[in-house]
């Protein structure tokens, strides 16, 4: 179908892995590199079409943000996990997370 401009597109750890979030919050993914933990979270949420973005990393990292502002993530290093927890405990607002090679990452927060 024609979903218009996508909200987010992410490529995973294998050449055949991608996750697309469409403009209406619906989504689709494909590939061997989709983390099982992310698939479990999507199923836990009853495959709701309310996603803003999903990002994938090269080592099974993932980040999911819903329209209500709730976020989930997994597969991240203990270093990044500590950093995120410190941010949240200091009343900062996490906005976005993505991942690169060798444990590198990008965080956006207020």
Image (cartoon, helix red, strand yellow):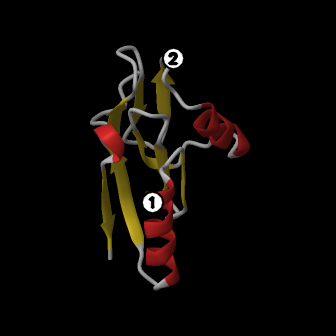
Q: Which residue is mark 1?
A: 79
Left or right: residue 4 compared with residue 44? left
Q: What residue sits 55% from the left and 42% below the top?
A: 49
Find the distance from the CA under tag 1 to the CA under tag 2: 26 Å
| Place of residue 72 in the rendered image (x, y in percent of width and height, measured from the top left) | 56, 54
Task: Name the residue furthest bottom.
Answer: 90
Q: What residue sits 48% from the left and 33% below the top?
A: 27
Residue 2, image quadrant: top left
Q: Which residue is mark 2?
A: 32
Q: Badge 1 local density, few (<14 within 10 Å), some, or many (20+)? A: few
| Place of residue 70 in the rendered image (x, y in percent of width and height, measured from the top left) | 54, 62
Q: Secondary structure at mark 1?
A: helix
Q: Secondary structure at mark 2?
A: loop
Q: Is residue 95 above or below residue 97?
A: below
Q: Badge 2 local density, few (<14 within 10 Å), some, or many (20+)? A: few
Residue 17, image quadrant: top left
- Quadrant where the C terminus sits is bottom left
Q: What residue sits 68% from the left and 37% below the top?
A: 40
| Place of residue 100 in the rendered image (x, y in percent of width and height, measured from the top left) | 30, 41
User: Which mark is drawn over residue 20?
Assistant: none
- Quadrant where the N terminus sits is top left
Is there any visible trace of residue 13 in the rendered image? yes
């Amino acid at each position: 179908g024609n979903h218009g401009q996508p909200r987010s597109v992410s490529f995973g750890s294998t050449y055949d892995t991608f996750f697309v979030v469409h403009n209406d919050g619906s989504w689709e993914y494909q590939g061997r590199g989709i983390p099982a933990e992310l698939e479990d979270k999507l199923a836990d949420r009853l495959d709701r079409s309310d996603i803003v973005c999903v990002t994938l990393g090269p080592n099974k990292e993932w980040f999911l943000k819903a329209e209500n502002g709730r976020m989930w993530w997994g597969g991240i290093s203990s270093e990044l996990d500590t950093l995120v927890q410190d941010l949240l405990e200091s009343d900062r607002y996490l906005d976005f997370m993505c991942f690169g090679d060798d444990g590198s990452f990008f965080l956006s927060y207020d």
